[in-house]
Amino acid sequence: MTDSTMNTPLRGARAVAVTIAFCVLASFCEGIDLQAAGVAASGIAAEFKPDSSQMGTFFSGSTLGLFFGALIGGRLAALPFSSKDGHFGRYSSGLASSSECLFFTCCSIGFPPC
């Protein structure tokens, strides 16, 4: 099975494998970001002594970020752009959002790109 943009079946299979690996990496990074609040909660509670409403706001921040990311990313996937098919596309918007997530995940764990 070949795609019109791919010349050989091997190239298409390689693209699928790279896409799956990239999605696994993005899911891993997203999981780290979502779980970071739970890991840090005991230290935050001991240091800053927030009340329950402040802790609720802290824990809902990641969910709110996912909401706005999905809202904006979904619109970007259908936004007209100067590409071959005339759209920014799911691939480009997924690549941009995953790269941003990877960058900020690396920053939060102290990895050198920041």
Image (cartoon, rainbow, N blue to C red):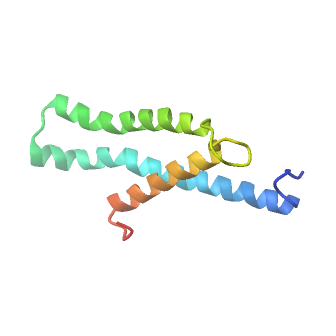
Q: In the depicted view, which residue is nearer to us: 50 or 91?
A: 91
Q: Is residue 91 above or below residue 54?
A: below
Q: Residue furthest front?
A: 82
- State left or right for residue 41 relative to residue 81: left
Q: Is residue 8 above or below residue 79?
A: below
- State left or right for residue 13 relative to residue 111: right
x and y percentages locating residue 24 in the rendered image: 58, 53
| Residue positioned 39% across, 61% down in the render | 106
Q: Is residue 15 above or below residue 59?
A: below
- State left or right for residue 7 relative to residue 70: right
- Number of numbered discs overlaid on the protein picture: 0
| Residue positioned 65% across, 47% down in the render | 82
Q: In the depicted view, which residue is nearer to us: 62 or 45?
A: 62
| Residue positioned 31% across, 33% down in the render | 60
Q: Which quadrant: the C terminus?
A: bottom left
Quadrant in the picture for residue 69: top left
x and y percentages locating residue 63 in the rendered image: 38, 35
x and y percentages locating residue 65 in the rendered image: 38, 38
Q: In the depicted view, which residue is nearer to us: 38 or 97?
A: 97
| Residue positioned 45% across, 52% down in the render | 101
Q: Residue furthest bottom?
A: 112
- State left or right for residue 48 relative to residue 38: left
x and y percentages locating residue 49 in the rendered image: 9, 41
